[in-house]
Image (cartoon, grey):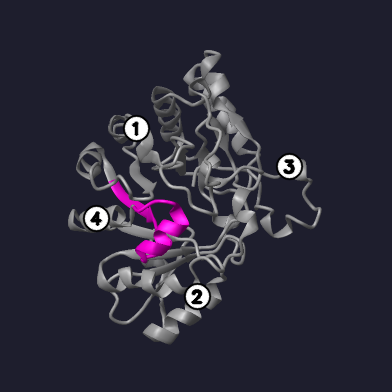
Amino acid sequence: MSLQDAYGRTIDYLRISLTDKCNLRCKYCMPPEGISRLQHAEVLTLEEVCRVAGVLTEMGIRRIRLTGGEPLVRKGIDGLMRELSQLPGRPELAMTTNGVALADRLEELVAAGLRSVNISLDTRDPGKYRGLTGTDAFDAVERSIRLAVQMGLPVKINCVPIRGINDEELTGLAEYARDKKIDVRFIELMPMGFARDYQGIPEAEILEKLEALYGPAERVEEASVDRGPAKYVHFKGFQGRVGFISPLSHTFCSECNRLRLTVEGRLKLCLYYPEGLDVKRLLRDGCTDEELKYAIHGIIRLKPERHGFCERDSGTVPLSHQETRSMYEIGG
């Protein structure tokens, strides 16, 4: 079975946010004093998460990524991963994490079914890392990266380039791909929540910096890249690849294949728009799996053709129809 929206896109990728909590306080994501967290009853239980994921895998979801906040602060994640790995179709399981607590959990997570990991990191300088995140956890992240590579797990490092924050860190981060079989991806800053106060760095400028240092970049043929929004290049002498995810300057909405399940139980269709399906209410009202499938089929038809970030300030989309929350609330 395949799940398709009104524009003929096959939806086979689910991102599940397990928590809005995080053990870092990155400047462009959270205020230093922290956030007002969701109450326990507002959050989907792990049993509810697994039930929704099970229904969706029966409908055609083939890849699941666990996110947050920071997913490793949610208790029971290894048990959840074990349950998810046994769902119909045996979905491919991945996780996006800041890496702070990963090394101590990695063996149990791999045993439970984890097959790849993305680690968010915006600098290799311990002092700048402390200034950006509010913690001294850089060595723990480095340990997690080393261990994941040693265990043979596919590793991607995600960096958000921000003007005045990590301009000078980008070439150093790319060296992970030079020295190890790691993909380093530069992700365009999304103007959401606290990030609206910052300015991202465009892909062309980053590529120019990298080519000045490492020589001409060779585009990686699409057929050799896993399906996804990243466009990759390779530099001579590098073991890994450098990728760019640029949802604003190089919109890839026509190829969007994803849904997001937020921590409070909303099946979200697009980052830009707040609309979605309140699956938590359906579950707690006693719906059957068939009723849930019917509701999901209905909402999928409303998945928008494209986001509206580029027109955000033009008045084209009313403010009441724009997402106002930050990424930690939605699921990174």
User: Which residue does the numbered mark 2 point to in the structure image?
Assistant: 206
Q: Look at the picture and state if 63 lies above or below 120.
A: above
Badge 4 or badge 2: first in the primary sequence: 4
Badge 1 or badge 2: first in the primary sequence: 1
What amino acid type is highlighted by mark number 1?
A: Pro
Disc 2 on helix, strand or loop?
A: helix
Residues at circles 4 and 2 in contact by the CB criterion of under 8 Å: no
User: Which residue does the numbered mark 4 point to in the structure image?
Assistant: 143
Disc 4 on helix, strand or loop?
A: helix
Question: Distance between the Cα atoms at labels 4 and 3?
Answer: 42 Å
What amino acid type is highlighted by mark number 4?
A: Arg
Q: Is residue 287 visible?
A: no
The part of the chain drawn in magenta is 115-136
Disc 1 on helix, strand or loop?
A: loop
Quadrant for the N terminus, please: top left
Mark 4 or 1: the one toward you:
4
Question: Distance between the Cα atoms at labels 1 and 2?
Answer: 41 Å
Badge 4 or badge 1: first in the primary sequence: 1
Residue at x 48% of width, y 23% of height? 40
What is the number of the mark on residue 88?
Answer: 1
Mark 1 or 3: the one toward you:
3
Within-10-Å neighbours for mark 1: few <14, some 14–19, many 20+: some
Residue 205 lies, in percent from the top left, at 54, 77
Quick check: 95 left or right of 253? left
Residue 236 lies, in percent from the top left, at 32, 82
Residue sitting nearer the eye, 6 or 187: 187
User: Which residue does the numbered mark 3 point to in the structure image?
Assistant: 321
What amino acid type is highlighted by mark number 2?
A: Ile
